[in-house]
Amino acid sequence: MRYTTTSPAPMRGRNFLMTPGPSNIPDRVLAAMHRPAVDLMDTDFMALAESCFDDLARVFGTAGRVFLYASNGHGAWEAALANLVGEGDLVLVPSTGMFSWAWGKLAEDLGARVEELPSDWRSGFDSARIEERLHADPGHRIRAVLAVQTDTATSVTSDVAAARRALDTSGHPALLMADVVASLGSTDFRMDEWGVDVAVAGSQKALMTPPGLAFNAVSERALRESRAAGTRRAYWDWRQRMGKEFYMLFCGTPPEHLIWALREALDMIFEEGLDAMFARHRRLARAVHAAVEVWGQAGALEFNAVNPAERANSVTTVRVADGIDADRVRLLARDGLDVSLGGGLGPLEGKAFRIGHMGWVNEPMVLGALGVVEMALKACGVPYGKGGVTAAVDSLAEARFPETSRAGAG
Amino acid sequence: MRYTTTSPAPMRGRNFLMTPGPSNIPDRVLAAMHRPAVDLMDTDFMALAESCFDDLARVFGTAGRVFLYASNGHGAWEAALANLVGEGDLVLVPSTGMFSWAWGKLAEDLGARVEELPSDWRSGFDSARIEERLHADPGHRIRAVLAVQTDTATSVTSDVAAARRALDTSGHPALLMADVVASLGSTDFRMDEWGVDVAVAGSQKALMTPPGLAFNAVSERALRESRAAGTRRAYWDWRQRMGKEFYMLFCGTPPEHLIWALREALDMIFEEGLDAMFARHRRLARAVHAAVEVWGQAGALEFNAVNPAERANSVTTVRVADGIDADRVRLLARDGLDVSLGGGLGPLEGKAFRIGHMGWVNEPMVLGALGVVEMALKACGVPYGKGGVTAAVDSLAEARFPETSRAGAG
Amino acid sequence: MRYTTTSPAPMRGRNFLMTPGPSNIPDRVLAAMHRPAVDLMDTDFMALAESCFDDLARVFGTAGRVFLYASNGHGAWEAALANLVGEGDLVLVPSTGMFSWAWGKLAEDLGARVEELPSDWRSGFDSARIEERLHADPGHRIRAVLAVQTDTATSVTSDVAAARRALDTSGHPALLMADVVASLGSTDFRMDEWGVDVAVAGSQKALMTPPGLAFNAVSERALRESRAAGTRRAYWDWRQRMGKEFYMLFCGTPPEHLIWALREALDMIFEEGLDAMFARHRRLARAVHAAVEVWGQAGALEFNAVNPAERANSVTTVRVADGIDADRVRLLARDGLDVSLGGGLGPLEGKAFRIGHMGWVNEPMVLGALGVVEMALKACGVPYGKGGVTAAVDSLAEARFPETSRAGAG
Amino acid sequence: MRYTTTSPAPMRGRNFLMTPGPSNIPDRVLAAMHRPAVDLMDTDFMALAESCFDDLARVFGTAGRVFLYASNGHGAWEAALANLVGEGDLVLVPSTGMFSWAWGKLAEDLGARVEELPSDWRSGFDSARIEERLHADPGHRIRAVLAVQTDTATSVTSDVAAARRALDTSGHPALLMADVVASLGSTDFRMDEWGVDVAVAGSQKALMTPPGLAFNAVSERALRESRAAGTRRAYWDWRQRMGKEFYMLFCGTPPEHLIWALREALDMIFEEGLDAMFARHRRLARAVHAAVEVWGQAGALEFNAVNPAERANSVTTVRVADGIDADRVRLLARDGLDVSLGGGLGPLEGKAFRIGHMGWVNEPMVLGALGVVEMALKACGVPYGKGGVTAAVDSLAEARFPETSRAGAG
C-alpha cells in the first residue's frame, strides 16, 4: 500500500471543498443517488436517461448529438479522438497548461502526430498564431485543433470562438475540438454558434455531479465524418451508441445512479438558468480576484493568469513568491481549517495554490473559504495585504445590490 | 392555511443555518437516521440506546440519572417540574430573557406560583439578589430556583454555579434547576460540581441532532424527592421510566431514528472532546464578537449583552439603532444570500438579529456567515464599521495559531 | 449496561421487519428526512407542517382538529386524557388486550378511576356490555369510554362504531375515545361518522413514519369541553397549541425531520388512496390468515382472534400449543432468516408470535415472510400443515386477479 | 424522445429487483455513496481506493494485478482485448449465449478475427471441442480463448478450469480470458489456480454495487505481453494505469462515489466470507430450481439450462411453451406485483423469463419473489404445477437446518 489513512482532527464543521473538481455536490444530487437500482428496461429510467441527453445538448448549446460515457474526462477525450482522428493524423494543440498538454499526450498514445503551439501557461491561446499555423498547412494535413476553454491547472480561459475564426479565415477544414471540462456551466459556451465540432466535458465540475460520467457533444459534420475516420473502437464508438436498443446508448449497462444524479443537477441548472449561472460564477470569481488583488499588494502573491479578462470563472491559480511554500498554506487550510484548496500542478507544484469556485457555490461559501485562506496566509507568515475578504465582501455587495451598496454607508 | 410556500430563488449553493437552534446537523448524523426501523426488541438497538443515557450523563457532568424524552425542550421543562413541583408550590425565576419567562409561564400552567427576579434582559442574573430573596424566605416556601444558563433570546450567559452558592450561603433547601438547552455542549456546565438538581436540555442545539428529543439530568436528591412530589404524570414520570422493561425507558416506543442520530452526535462530541468543543465555541464566539465590535463603531449596532464576559458562546444578539429594521437585514441575508439568522424575540422583535454559532460550526462557516452579514448591512444601508470580517479572521488566526500569527506579516 | 450488542450473522440480504410497529419505512420517507434542519421560521417548512395537520384530519375522517406531538403513542394517550379527564373522573375501558389495559393504567396514573369490562383477550369488545354498563350509570359518572380499535397485542379488531351506538342508545354523555394506533391507515376508521370524540394514533405503524410523532384528533365537543376539564397540563394542552404563533402548534421547536417524513408518507397514502390502502391491508391479512389456517391443521398453531371477522388487517397473533416455545420460532426467523416477527405480550409471552403486516407491505414482502415462518416452523420441529405459503399465493391471486386466477390452471 | 414515463400504480411496498443485474444494492452501500466529493488528493480516499484493488484481487483469486475502470462490462471487455489482442489476431469464442456472442462481436469491432464454437445455448461450452480446435491450430494463430463463466442470458455456467486444461493438454499458448461478470461473487472462481490470464467483471451483479465500475484482473504473463500487444489505447491501457501518480490508477479523476460504494460492498463480502457467499447463492439457486421443477410438471415451463449441474447460481432462465407469452408473466409481476424479473434475450425474447438471484439476496427475498411468480403464472393462465414455493421452502429448510428439518413435522 502506497497510501495510508491519516488521523485528521475530528471534523468540527462542514468541509469546504474548494478544489477545481470534484466540486461541491448539492444535497439534492446526493439524495437522487440514494435509491435502489432498477431493471435495465425500467420505463421511467429510460425516459429519464433520454431526457439527460437532450438537456445536456442545451447546456452545450448545440442541436447536435450528445454521447454520455461511464468514464472520466480522459475517457471522453479519447472518445472524441477515436471517432475522428486516425493513426498518423496531425493534431494542433494551442498550449494553455497541463490539460492541453495531457490531451495532446493522449492523442499521441492513440497514434496521432501532435504539434503544440507553445505558451508561457499564463495567458490564453493566441488565435493569430493558430491562424498563422493553419495558413502554413496548405495541404490540410492538420486534422483537428484541440482547444481547451479553461485550463484547470493554470486557470486561464481562452477564446474558443476566436479559434473558429482562425479556421474560417484561413479556410482550413480542420475540425475544432473543445475541452470544456472546467468551464461548462460556469462560463458561456456556445457550441453551434462558435462552430465547435466536438466538445468534451465531465460531470464533476460546474455540473455538480459526482465523477464517473463524461460527455461528447458532436456536430452533424463530425458525426458524418466519424463513419470513416478515427481508430478501431467499440465502447467509445458514436455510431454504435445510436443503435435502436436502449442499452446501446451506453454500450451496455447504464450507470444508473450517476444518471439520476445528473438528472437532478440538470434540473437545478435549468431552475437557475444558464445565464444566471454564468453571472453567478463571474460574480464569485470577481470576489476571489478582489481578495487576491489585495493580498498581492505585499508582493508575495500574484495571479497566474496575467490578463484579467482571461482569469477563469471557475478556478483561480495563485502563485507565491520564491521561498514560500504554497503547499504549506494549502495543507494548513485543509488539515486545520476545513477548507480544501487545489495545489499547483506540473511546473507550479509547490509554487501555487488554486481556489476552485465552480458549481454549487454561493456567497457565504466563497467568503468563508477566502477568510480561511487569509487565516492560513497569516499563520504561515506569508506577507499579504490585509483586508482581502473585506474587498470580496464589497465586490459581491456591489455586484448583487449595485444601487444600495454604492449609496450605503460602511 | 395560514402559511404558504414562497418561491425562493433557486439555491445556488449551500444554505448556512446560523440560527440559534435548530443548528447545522452533521452529514454523519443525518446518515445515521437513513436506515430502516428495527424491532423494538432489537438487541443492538437496545444496547445503543442505553449507551446514549450514559454518555449524556457525561455531557451533563453528572453521576445522576438521565431521562430522554421524545419531545422538545418545552416537554423537558414540563418533565422537570412535573416530577418535583406540585400545585401551589412557589418557584423563583431569575429573569434572563424570553426563555426564563417562558419556563416560568409553563410552571404557572402546571399550577405553581411563580416569582420573577426582574432584569433588563441585557445581563446575566444577579446571584446576590437570588441570595437576598432566599434569605427573605425563612419558611422555605420556595421549592425551586429555575436558572437559565444561556438565554437564546438575549444571548446572555449567567453564572449557574453562583446560583448554587446563593442557595448554600442562605442555607435554603430549594432545588436548583438549570435550563442548559442553549448552552450544553458549547459552554462549560458541571452539574454535579455546581450542585444542580435538575438540568434540562434538547437535542437540536450544540448537540447537533434533529429536534424531537429532550433530556432531564437528575440528581440523587431530586430523584428521591420526586417520589412524593410534583403533579400527576405518566409520560414525564421519572420513576416509571426506571422500570425493568426496555420500553419503559421511553414510556413506550422509542424514537429510533432520533436516537441513532443522537448516538452519532455523541460519538462526534467525544471524538472532539468536551473541552475542545467548549474552546472551539469560545473561539468562534470571540470572532463573531470581534466583527460586531468593528461594525458597531458606526453607532448603529451594539451587543445586547452589555457585559463581554456574559456574551454567550452559542449565539450573539445584535441590536440595531432606532429607525433601522433588523428584520430587513435578516431577510435579505436569508432570501438573497443563503444565510439564515435568528430574529429578535419579544421586545427585540425587529430591533435585533441573532447570529447562531453552536454545534457543528467551524472557521469557514462562521467567516462565510459574517461576510454575508456585512454584505447585508451594506445592501440595507445600515451604517457599519468596515472590516468586521477581517477582525474575525485575525481573531481566529490569533486564537488558533498564536505564535505564527502574531509574528506573521499582514 | 443491561443490554449488550450481539454479533449477529452478517446481513446477507434485506431484513424483513414484520413486527407490528415500528413497520417498514418507505425509502421515500427515509429520504425525506435526509436533509439539513431549517430555520424555525422557514416559510416552506411552516406551510408543509400545516398541511400535515389538514391531511391527518382526512386520514382520521374528521372535520375536527388534529394535534401533533413530538412523543409516542403513550404521550398521545396522556394528551387525550389530560385535556378531558380530571382527577377522580371515572373512565370505562372495554378490555381487548395489553393495550386497553395499558391505556387504563395510564389513566390511573393521571388520577382517574378506571373500570375495565373484562374479556378473554381473544375477541373484540362487546358493545352490548358497554351499553349495559352505561345504563347502570344513570348519574353519568362515567366521563369517557376508552375503545381500542385494534389491540396490537391480541390482533383483535373491535367495532368502534358499535361503541358509539351503545352510548347513543343508552343516552349517555360519556366521551368516546378511540385508540387507532395499530389500525389507522390499515383499517377503515371514520371519526366523525362514528361519533368518536378523540382519536389517538402514532406515526410508526400503518402511517409508515419513524416513531417519535403521535396524534390526537379531536371533535368540536371535546375541544369545547377541554377548556374546563382535564388535569394541569402545558405540553399536552390543546388550547395552547391553537395559539397564533407557529411554534405554538408544537409547544416549542417542531421535530422537523419527523414532519418531513410524515409529509412524504401522507403523500404516499393519498397517491394510493385510503380505500385502496384498506383493501390492500385486508387482502394481505387474508393471505396471512390463509397460511395460518393451513399451518394450524396439524393442531399446534391457532389464531388468537377466534372470530375471523375480528382478525386485524395489520397484525396476526398466532398462538402455539403447550410445550412449544414460540420465541424459538421467532428468534430463529430473526437471527437466522432475516425476518423480524413480534413476540407474544403479557400472558402470551412465549406462547405466541405475531406477524405484522401493516404500512409499506406488498405481496412479495408478505409471501417472503410467510415462507420464512414456514421454514422456521419446520426447523423448530413444530408440527404444521404443509402448504401455508401456497394457500397465501392462491388467496392473493384470487383477490388481485379474480377472473383469470379462477379460470387459470395450477 | 423514444421513451416515455408511464404512471405506474403507486408503490405500496418495496420493489423486489430480481433481474440478473443490476441487482439489489444493500442499504449500507447506498449510504456509503451519500457523502460529499473529496479532494482528489485526499489521503483517506487514496488509501481507501487502493485497498479496493487489493481486495478485488482476493475476490478474483489472483496474485495478479487488478484494474478498475469507470465504465461498464463492455468497457472492461474492450480493455481486456485492447491490451492483448491486435488487429487481425484470431480469437476463439466457445458459444454460451448472447454474452459470448457480444464479446466476440466487440472483438471484431476492434479488428480481431473471431471464430465461434457453436452451441445450442442450453449447455455450457464443451472443453473437448475447444481442445480439438486448439489441436487444429499448430501454427498458434489463435491469440486468445474468450470463455464466459455464466452467460446471463442463458443462465448456463461453464467449466472455466476445463478450458484451461484444454489449453494445457493441447500445448497451445493462447491466452485464456474469462468473463465472470455474472458469476463473480456468486460462484467459485479461482483465477490463478485455474490459469486464467485475464478476468473481466463489473460492479453491478453479485458485487452489489451500482453500475458504473468494471474490472480487469490480469496475470503476470498477460501484463508482460500487453507491453507489445493489443491496439492503440489510452484509457484502457494497463501500463499507464500503473504509473506512480495516484490519478493514473484511474487515468484521470476517480469515480469517488462508486468507489466508496464498492469499498462497502467488499467489506460486506469479507464479513460474510467468499465461501459462505457461494454457498448462500447455491442454496438460493437450488430453491429457485426446486420451484421451477414443480411448476414445470404441468408441461408449460422448463429450464433453459438442460444440465442441472450447469444451472447458474446467480440467474435462472425459464422457458415457456409455445403459445405462452413470457413477457406477459414478467410485466404482470413487475407492474402489478412489485417484482422485477429479467426478460428473454435474443432468440428467447418473449419465450423465457429470467429470475435473478445474485448479490444481496436471502431467503425471504427469494421466497417472496417465487410467490409472486406463482401468482403471475396463475393470473396469466399458464399451466403450472402447484406448490413451487412450498418446494422452495423445503429446499431451503433442508439446506439451512439439515437435522431439524428432516426430523421435523410438516
Image (tube, coloured by chain):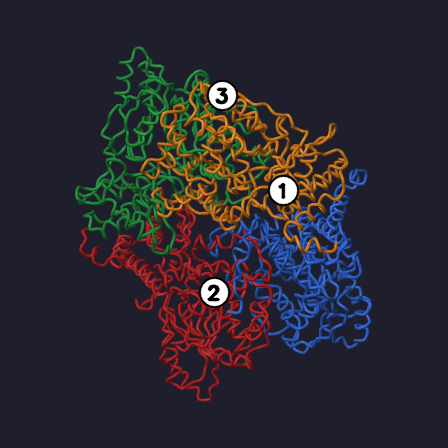
Chain colours: A blue, B orange, C green, D red
Q: In which quadrant of the rendered view does residue A240 lie?
A: bottom right
Residue located beneath label 1 in the image: B285
Residue located beneath label 2 in the image: D202
Residue C268 in percent (x, y) is at 47, 39
Q: Residues within 10 Å of mark 1 (few under 14, many from 20)?
A: many
* Residue C177 in the image: above or below residue D202: above
Residue D358 in percent (x, y) is at 39, 60
In front of the other: A74 or C387: A74
Residue D263 in percent (x, y) is at 47, 61
Residue located beneath label 3 in the image: B108
* Residue B39 in the image: above or below residue D169: above
| Callouts 3 and 2 on one subunit | no
User: What label does residue C334 carry, if any?
Assistant: none
- Which amino acid type corresponds to the residue marked 2 in the rendered image? Gly
Residue B253 in percent (x, y) is at 38, 37
Q: Is residue D295 left or right of residue C43?
A: left
